[in-house]
Amino acid sequence: MVNDVMKIGFGYDVHPLVSGRKLVLGGVEIPFARGLNGHSDADVLAHAIGDALLGAAGLGDIGRMFPDTSPLYKDISSLLILEKIKDELRGKNLKIGNIDASVVIEEPKISPYVETMQANISKVLEIFREAVNIKATTQEKLGFLGKGQGAAAFAVVLLNEDS
């Protein structure tokens, strides 16, 4: 029996840039004077993808599943969070069709790291690399993102029921 049920999810995350933290995006540590501040490694890209996956599956959001009040998740790699989400999806008999994400950051330029980010995410989620698309853009110097005070990411995912 063929099942044509598709589930679409949307995710968004934002974190401030601060001194004394590593800048991690898509599981890649990017050399920069500041990093994203948060309870985990504050990887906005992985968080947006995670929220999109959880939303499509009807499993809430990262904040509910991985609360920032829990010491278990202090400084955790967001790739481990994605791995746990992948396991939850399998438990609901869902498979990832594709991921499309955008990272918004004025600097540093992240385009040299995008392929490695895609490889990291596809490996952790056990999907084809071609199923993960990541784009980078700036805020054209507008707002707090444009002033270099933080970074944000948006993600859309498609899930299918695994037959």
Image (cartoon, grey):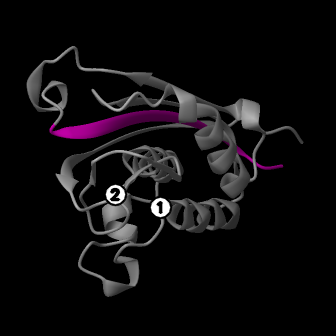
Q: Quadrant of residue 150?
A: top left
Label 2 close to label 1 by CB (< 8 Å): yes
Q: Nearer the viewer, residue 158 or 32?
A: 32
Location of residue 71 with respect to 121 vertically, above or below:
below
Residue plotted at (36% across, 57% down): 22
- Which image quadrant for residue 157? top right
Dominant SS type (magenta): strand
Residue at the extreme bottom of the image, as rendered: 71
| Residues shaded magenta | 149-163
Q: Which label's residue is closer to the chain start, 2 or 1? A: 2
Question: In this view of the protein, which residue sits in the foreground, 95 or 5?
Answer: 95
Circle number at residue 78: 1
* Screen quadrant of the N terminus: top right
Q: CA distance from mark 2 to mark 1?
A: 7 Å
Instruction: Name the one closer to the observer, 132 or 75.
Output: 75
Q: Which residue is mark 2?
A: 42
